[in-house]
Amino acid sequence: MSRADDLAKAIADTRRQANEVEARISRILTMPSGAPRRRAMALAESERAEFAKEIARLRKMQKGAAPKPTQPDAPAPRAQSAGREKGEKWRPSSCDVTKLPPQRGGWKELSFSRHDVAAFEARDREAIEQARRRIAQSESQDLFCPVPEIVHELSPGSLAVYAYVTLDGKRTHVGTLAAQADTLDGERVFVTKSADIEEYGVLADCPGIGRKMYERAAEVACASGGRIVGSRLRSVFSEKFWKRQITRKRATCRGSTAEVFGAPLDRLREALEDGRITVPQFVQLTCNVGPRPSANLWPCEYVPLSRGACPTPPAKHVDLSGLKGRGRYRLTTASRRR
């Protein structure tokens, strides 16, 4: 095994340990307020910071172990055989992905100095030109995203949903949505705990993949006699999803407030800084984030999906009516035959 392979394995192992700390933080937040919770949170936050430093150190070593790869073209529509499913139509983002905004929504993770903006845009000149060409191409012809494969694992204590796509003939893991079994008002539920993304670039170019993962989680939870629930520690992306479900009366607000989970924005910023994603991809992924809430708290401690949004036999149909259009989720789907 080469040094580059060793470093990649070390990064993956460290990231897994960091994810375990994130899961522990989620559990700590369910503890009653008081000194024990504060001590446990302080220890967990310290461990999370150490893992973040170690990942940054390993990435720097990784950069020195191999020449920096050139940025690939944005995924183009692949040749489709007659009658083969094409996947969802690709549409340009509602944001201008050819420019890096200096700030967005008051989030410090999305704030950049003029020097940073100029440096990242200069580094990603080719990717920005590719994005311009792709947008222009979409005006004259339909472009489609690769068809994702969504699978799940259900156990008495947890639910996990995995997304894969075929890229260059290889089955590639894109991300995982994990939920933990619990009870809410005496009812069986699955509380969402984490969304681990492996391929930010794929998710940026085809944002519907994230929506399909939530759809499958909703279907499986309902079929097992439960429901999915937004947890009391939510990222800006998760909050956007659940807020829309409340607006559409497909979810309800329980309790007072939830805490903001900032790690996903931190990871996106790191991915932009070390070149794993380009300016167009970063802007796409952060296009419609809402503003940072006051006191760093979201309204609603928990957000359970309404029972009426579950499929009703014999027609298995989940209607999560949601963010349709450019760079948003469209959460209406018919259950797949399995």
Image (cartoon, grey):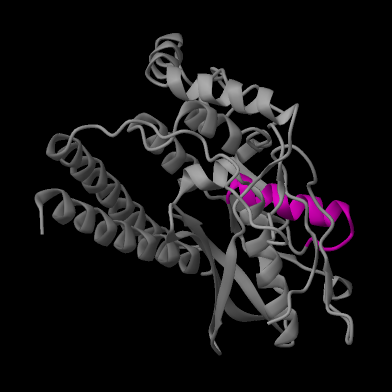
Up-down relation of residue 112 to residue 77 (above or below):
above
User: What stretch of residues is rendered in magenta?
Assistant: 235-253
Say how many tags the image has.
0
Residue placed most toward the observer, 225 or 331: 331
Up-down relation of residue 128 to residue 59 (above or below):
above
| Residue located at (51% from left, 21% from top) | 128
Q: Is residue 74 left or right of residue 243?
A: left
Q: Is residue 246 left or right of residue 93?
A: right
Up-down relation of residue 140 to residue 113 (above or below):
below
Residue found farthest to the bottom: 156
Residue found farthest to the front: 82
The location of residue 207, given as percent across then percent down, is 63, 47
Residue placed most toward the observer, 71 or 175: 71
The location of residue 64, given as percent across then percent down, is 14, 35
Quarter in which the C terminus is drawn: bottom right
Asked if residue 233 can be seen in this view, the reply is yes
Asked if residue 262 can be seen in this view, the reply is no
The location of residue 72, given as percent across then percent down, is 41, 35
Q: Main secondary structure of the magenta part?
A: helix
Q: Is residue 8 left or right of residue 1?
A: right
